[in-house]
Amino acid sequence: MLESYLPILVLIAIALLFAVGSVTFSFIFGPKKPSKIKLAPYECGMPLIGTARERFSVKFYIVAMLFILFDIEAVFLYPWAVVFKKLGMFGFVEMGVFIVILLVGYAYVWKKGALEWE
Amino acid sequence: MSEMLSLSNDPTLFIAVMLAKILVVFIVVILIVAYATYAERKIIGHMQTRLGPTMTGPLGLLQPIADGLKLFFKEDIIPSQASKLAFILAPMMILVPAFITVAVIPFGDSITVKGYTVPLQISDLNIGVLYILAMSGLGVYGIVLAGWSSNNKYSLLGGVRSAAQMISYELAAGLAIISVFMLSGTLQLSDIVAAQSGSILNWYIFSQPLAFCLFVITSLAEVNRTPFDLPEAETELVSGFCTEYSSMKYALFFMAEYANMVVLSAITATLFLGGPAGPFPGPINLLIKVFAFMFFFIWIRATFPRVRYDQLMYLGWKVFLPLALLNIVITGAVVVF
């Protein structure tokens, strides 16, 4: 079984080599004429205002949390889907209950307005 | 039926065949990526009654090579405020997962080499689909890291927007394809192709039209293509997470984006369109299906305007997610009753 992962390791090595190689190549052969203005962060040509290390909308954290919750539910569905035909009626009812519980949480999140972006 | 070639029965031949397969697939993907940029400019040009590139070589065919060479010899700028290590690693962290996802795509039936059976697939993992989802998930890290390490407000916003968009649509895509595995009973891609063999009516696009539509649209969002290209919304965010990048690092982002397009087209073809099945030899059938999807992606870009960010989130969380769950329940009910 492990030998089916060998080609993937080789492919990772080749892809990494390609990425590192091309970046190194352009680093060596590209011109280097740095200046203070050129190395400053781009802000449409205006003088810099503050830094980018600032707070951003909490919405993004909520999306990340919801993703983790729902993606775990999705991962539970994968093994179930593979053996679904063998489980038959039992599997269908069982997963129906699971999806209904999932939907209760989903309805709560929707009602609370966590999915709104105004 | 001859024996399957493995590491135990002929190690030298196994490694030679493995390297040959990997190199051929890698080079083919790079070529498709290079010429996808040309095709995109040419097709969009003609759709907007322009000619697209014409100057470099006959019909502008050498344009991707000229672009590549130009980017190789451009100055590699690392902003003084950037976090250097993360800034250099980020493009590679996006490119590598994009290129290695292709490992599990079956591109033809098996062939016989020196009396051994060799499957035309780099690696036939029994968890092939989970591998694909895992690798497409890894790409998000590179984007967030690129946006954050640039220390630029536009990059940061582009990065977090992109991450939020990709994880939202990854969820919908992951749920949409579950119904396919309920029918095939396996996560191994070669078995999914085998389950669709026989007649064209066995293709899952006919038994799972809703899952197919959901997966194609969510794929568009996952590779950040129009109408879901908000991370790179030029009018608001300059160039999104890759604003500060130049030279080959910038090129790596675009190669990763096009490689993701190629891979997602191939995955859609494998899951819903019978993979390498068709009238021609296997790899050619798969390439035809991949090119058809790529043309579709480009066509969409020429046709649709960009959606607003709240519309994007609305679509992902309030439309696609329930539809994907509904599709699972319907499929379950049809299989059981």
Image: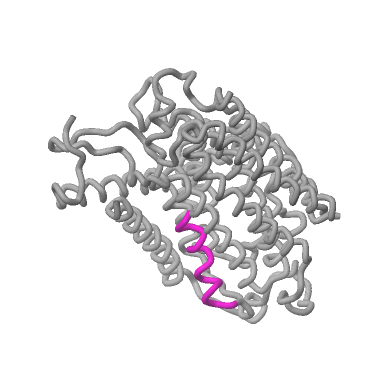
Q: Which residue lies furthest to the front in this view?
A: A90
Q: Which residue is drawn at 47% across and 38% down?
A: A83
Tell me: residue B301, above or below residue B233: above
Q: Can residue B310 be seen in this view?
A: yes
Residue B139: x, y in percent?
A: 54, 57
Residue A112 placement (x, y as % from top left): 84, 55
Identify the residue at horizontal 42%, vertical 63% (top origin): A22
User: Residue B179: x percent and y percent?
Assistant: 56, 35
Q: What colouring does the structure picture have?
A: one colour
Image-based side of A106 in relation to B183, left or right: right
Residue at the extreme right of the image, as rendered: A118
Is residue B56 in view?
Answer: no
Left or right of residue A114, residue B37 in this image: left
Residue B314 in the image: above or below residue B45: below
Q: Which residue is drawn at 72% across and 53% down?
A: B233
Q: Give the range drawn in magenta.
A: B83-97
Residue A17: image location, x then y, percent: 37, 63
> Does B305 lie within the magenta span?
no
Is B47 rendered above or below residue B56? above
